[in-house]
Amino acid sequence: MTSSWGETDNRFAVPAKLPALVEAYTGKAPPPVRFRLPSWEAALDGISGQPTQMLSDATITTEPKDQRFRKLGDRAVTRDAVVDACTSLDMADDEAVVAAFVLVMAWGSGTSNNRSLRNTKNALQDVGAAASALRQSATALRAAQHIVDPSIAAIHRQFSLPGIGEAFFTKWFAFAGFVPGRDWQPAILDSRVRATLHKSLDVWLNQLTDTHRDPERYVAYLTAMHRWSAALAQPMTSTQLEWIMFDHNGKSI
């Protein structure tokens, strides 16, 4: 009997080098991400509402320990804090949805990706339309019970915000589409994760799906991550495995 993770499909067998990669990360966890609050406030000045309200919320973000970063107005946020902010979100509140999206963008950008500031501003020129697109994708992902649900590829295919490509809208998927206790979760698919898949593990998403389009490749990626994390000897979630691949960034094993 085939489950929603494709256990009977040999294409999703654990890559030969993956156990060694995971072993190298034993005891490690993602650190908080530092971002520059004044840069985000300046970039989104003029956007209606309070798009940066979560960035300065002391219940979500904190001041960095290093005094030199405090002087620059930096703040730090953990992945868990972003998850909590997104899962407790009032989806009917456009301003709250947009603020959560800005939090996700800041987490995903750190202090080095200035292009994200411009892209986020472009995405929010029409706040109502942006909130609608963000809300629809999050609501649909939360409702999906299984990875094989056809809605997941459709959500990927239909998502559209100016300047926001797969590397960042799958960050929104991973946080706003998260459902505590569900046996699958959306995951981030960006260039660093792809680099580890391709260069470190010799895995190509086109090999995992018969339909070579981005939405179907994303579903194949989700299937692989959940299948692999369940099969590894070390206790592992797909979210932990995603971070390992992100952090490793295509280096040799």
Image (spheres, grey):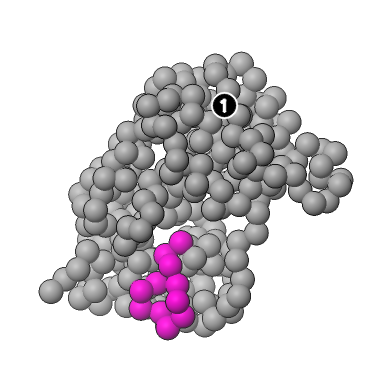
Q: Nearer the viewer, residue 153 or 84?
A: 84
Q: Residue at x 31, y 45 (%)?
A: 142
For the record, the magenta segment spans 229-239
* Residue 182 visible, this orientation: yes
The question of residue 238 being in magenta is answered with yes
Q: Which of the 4 image quadrants contains residue 2?
A: bottom left
Residue 240 vertical position relative to residue 136 in the rendered view, above or below: below
Query: In what element is the residue under mark 1?
Result: loop
Q: Residue at x 86, y 47 (%)?
A: 67
Does residue 96 show up magenta in the picture?
Answer: no
Asked if residue 78 lies left or right of residue 85, the reply is right
* Residue 2 in the figure: left or right of residue 154: left
Q: Residues within 10 Å of mark 1 (few under 14, many from 20)?
A: many
Q: Position of residue 40 (x, y in %)?
A: 66, 31
Q: Residue at x 56, y 48 (%)?
A: 81
The amino acid marked with disc number 1 is Pro
Q: Which image quarter is the N terminus in?
A: bottom left
Residue picked out by circle 1: 51
